[in-house]
Amino acid sequence: GAGVSQTPSNKVTEKGKYVELRCDPISGHTALYWYRQSLGQGPEFLIYFQGTGAADDSGLPNDRFFAVRPEGSVSTLKIQRTERGDSAVYLCASSLGFMGQGPQYFGPGTRLTVT
Amino acid sequence: SQQGEEDPQALSIQEGENATMNCSYKTSINNLQWYRQNSGRGLVHLILIRSNEREKHSGRLRVTLDTSKKSSSLLITASRAADTASYFCAPRDSGYALNFGKGTSLLVTP
């Protein structure tokens, strides 16, 4: 079956611009997560959705970052006034069930470069 | 959620050899998961071991868990070039986020 998909695969933007990154989870997965991975590091948690609501957004670095999941399926991560330090690979994952204790299934990521 | 710490940071072996990497964590867990990341297939879940399990196998993978020492190990037997990747452990407590360390970078040479 189809896995987690993310678009675009690459995004280059200028400092100060606004970007949107999209995640399409595995059908039927109620839990959705966003992570960010910098070079040489493991992925870092950003936000977790259970259904339509953001159950935990404690990993978002500041208020320039925002994510939505209006219908409980596709999610969009939005970054305002991008900075060079935002350059990273943004990973989306989904999983079955409440509290997400099982495996998480990751998408291929969006590589964001802020120039 | 707590973070696992993988050791060694880097490992280089030849095809056919076994590879062992370790994970340490700090507090009680419900389960511990191992993931692999390479450029071709992204980040992929390998195996989950529950806190009441001591050993688990999946193909050429063998995972052990010692909750008294708060440690886990991942053994890959008869390594192949395709096993070249970074390996991450994710100890799971009651939280839902995966907190990854820097991982173990495995290089398998022909």
Image (spheres, coloured by chain):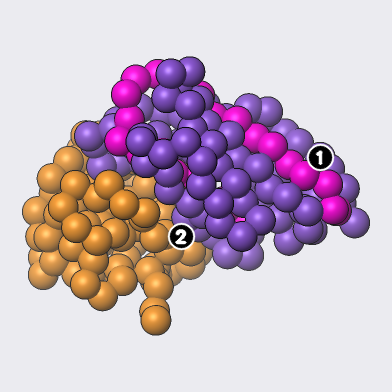
Chain colours: A orange, B purple
Cα separation between marks 2 and 1: 27 Å
Question: Dot 2, crowdedness within 10 Å: few (<14), some or many (≥20)?
Answer: many
Residue found farthest to the bottom: A1
| Residues rendered magenta in the picture | B15-38
> Pointer 2 indicates a residue of which chain?
A
- Percent position (x, y) of residue A55? 13, 45
Give the residue type at disc 2.
Gly
Q: Amino acid at mark 1?
A: Ser
Residue A64 belongs to the span the image colors magenta: no
Say if residue A23 shows up in the picture: yes
- B41 above or below B78? below
Q: Quadrant of residue A104?
A: bottom left
Which of the two residues, A74 or A104, is positioned nearer the viewer here? A104
- Residue at image point 35% right, 36% down: B52
Q: Residue at x 19, y 58 (%)?
A: A97
Where does residue A82 sit, x and y in percent of width and height? 36, 46
Of marks 2 and 1, the one in the foreground: 1
Q: Position of residue B38 (x, y in %)?
A: 62, 56
Q: Which residue is mark 2?
A: A109
Q: On the rendered structure, is B28 left or right of A88?
A: left
Say which mark, if any, is on residue A112: none
Residue farthest to the right?
B110
Is A102 above or below relative to B73? Answer: below
Q: Nearer the viewer, residue A109 or A20?
A: A109
Q: Is residue A6 above or below residue A100?
A: below
- Which quadrant of the structure image shows residue B100? top left
User: Residue B12 has which mark?
Assistant: 1
Quarter in which the N terminus of chain A is drawn: bottom left
Label 1 secondary element: strand
Host chain of mark 1: B
